[in-house]
Image (cartoon, grey):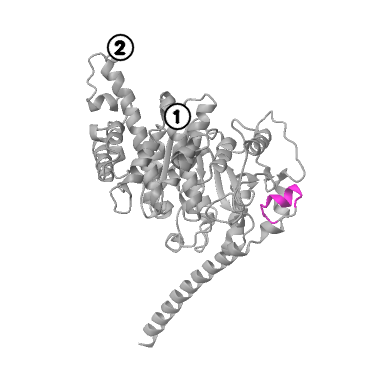
Amino acid sequence: MSKVAKVIADESLEKKLWKAADTLRKNIDAGEYKHVAMGLIFLRYISDAFEKHYEKLKAGKGEFKGADPEDRDEYKAENVFFVPQTARWPYLVANATKPQIGVMIDAALDAIEEENHSLKGVLPKVFGRPNIDPASLGGLINLFTNADMEVTKERNGDVLGMVFEYFLGEFALAEGKKGGQFYTPRYVVELMVNMLEPYKGRVFDPCCGSGGMFVQSEKFVKEHQGRVNDISIYGQESNQTTWRLCKMNLAIRHISSDQVRWNNEGSFLNDAHKDLKADYILANPPFNVSDWSGELLRSDGRWQYGTPPPGNANFAWLQHFIYHLAPSGQAGIVLAKGALTSKSGGEDQIRKALIEDGNLIDCIVNLPAKLFLNTQIPAALWFLSRNRKNGKFRNRSGEILFIDARNLGKLINRRNRVLTRDDIKTIADTYHNWRNPNGSYEDIKGFCCSAPLARVKELDYVLTPGRYVGLPDEEDDFDFKERFATLKAEFEAQLKEETKLNKAIAENLAKVLV
């Protein structure tokens, strides 16, 4: 029996496929193999969706009577990508054993991009490279022509979407720190979406990675019998490779990515949606970024609550999100826990202004350790609301909800922890019971506390949940690696400023002495 055939029968389809695909990887590193596997999953999806509509047009019944199955407009009208004959999955399967199969797949992807301009520059043409073994590539094609997929062909988009999402997570795990840059763990995204409940409106993520926030938002609406078309998504990503993964991820889900933009300057220097006011913002910006061009943006109009320090982007991200919130908009953001307590560079004053002047902070959730693949820095969720006084929820303007979830989750290995469905429900239900007019919220010692602003002021505007719920929080107040990185960045920024001042003084002295 082959390695591919030795998958465990009672595992889910996506787990089976991952195990089998991983045996075909051989000596290719995960970062490169990611594009091969994800590209083929996408190709399988786009071809199956095309073939399904092709058969309807060919049958020529009802509204499709007299339709030409090779007419590109027939597919465009149904939001289906047109696939040329040499790019269709059956054609590639028939040629899977040929030595030039990699070159044929690259040509197929080129042809698809030519026919579908929304995919221009998105698909990975990496299959013809010398280090990609044609035999392994053929094996991967046969793997994705799996009988289980055929059985579920009516739900093909959903099935392949789940496979795509699962592979994203596994590749992120395999790549470690580097891979985490394009992937926020599904359970973290699911928690944020379940807390905010984005049923209707504009959803924005200005550091969108592979698009997980958008996928979960659409999934949430579907599961709650909402209307998916009531949501429109807007995104921005500075890493082009990650942006491509995002576009493919959304296409597999039939989610429009027209407003998901890429530029290598990033959201601070080149805001792709300057005039957007979003109903929901869901984001996981990179933690504690020191090279965010803060020196170039000292007088930027987004810094309504204070100028963020040039050595750390955390409070720049927060204010960027707030700038893009609609009058009744809400946001869920992942940030390093240090932002809850930091006092360097005036961050404590910005935090105070967000609480006192802005009345923006609704809830803080302390997350368990080891949830993220790309960092061991502890993290917390910030939930912000533009209108905490009224609207569809009760007036919460005089209080902040603190949830300490450090003791939730389960370890899946020595380095990684996950949140279970019960964990997600427990946290989300606590938030909903607290903010809803008819909710049945009660403080639970060691887990949650609704603290009045007077108490927050008494604690000098430090937002560590442990201080409010009654758990020891020494471990949250000081993280050596995080603090060292922050101090190093601030020291370097001060040196730059000192060099500028010395130069200016020297120039002025030279003018006086002339």
Q: Mark 2 = which residue?
A: 62
Q: Amino acid at mark 2?
A: Gly
224 in relation to 2, above or below? above
Q: Position of residue 372 (x, y in %)?
A: 56, 50
Mark with earlier residue (1, 2):
2
Question: Which numbered circle lies on residue 148?
Answer: 1
Above or below, 478 against 400 in this view is: below
Tell me the residue at 62%/36% (across/down). 421
Between 184 and 459, the residue placed more toward the observer is 184
Q: Quadrant of residue 187?
A: top right
Magenta range is 460-471
Image location of residue 168, percent across then percent down: 46, 44
Within 10 Å of disc 2 (Cα), the crowding (few <14, some 14-19, many 20+) is: few
Placement of the C terminus among the 4 image quadrants: bottom left
Q: Is residue 166 left or right of residue 108?
A: right
Q: Please rate how many residues cluster around mark 1, counting C-alpha atoms within 10 Å: few if below 14, some from 14 to 19, many from 20.
A: few
Query: How far across and how far down the image is residue 137, in percent?
Result: 34, 44
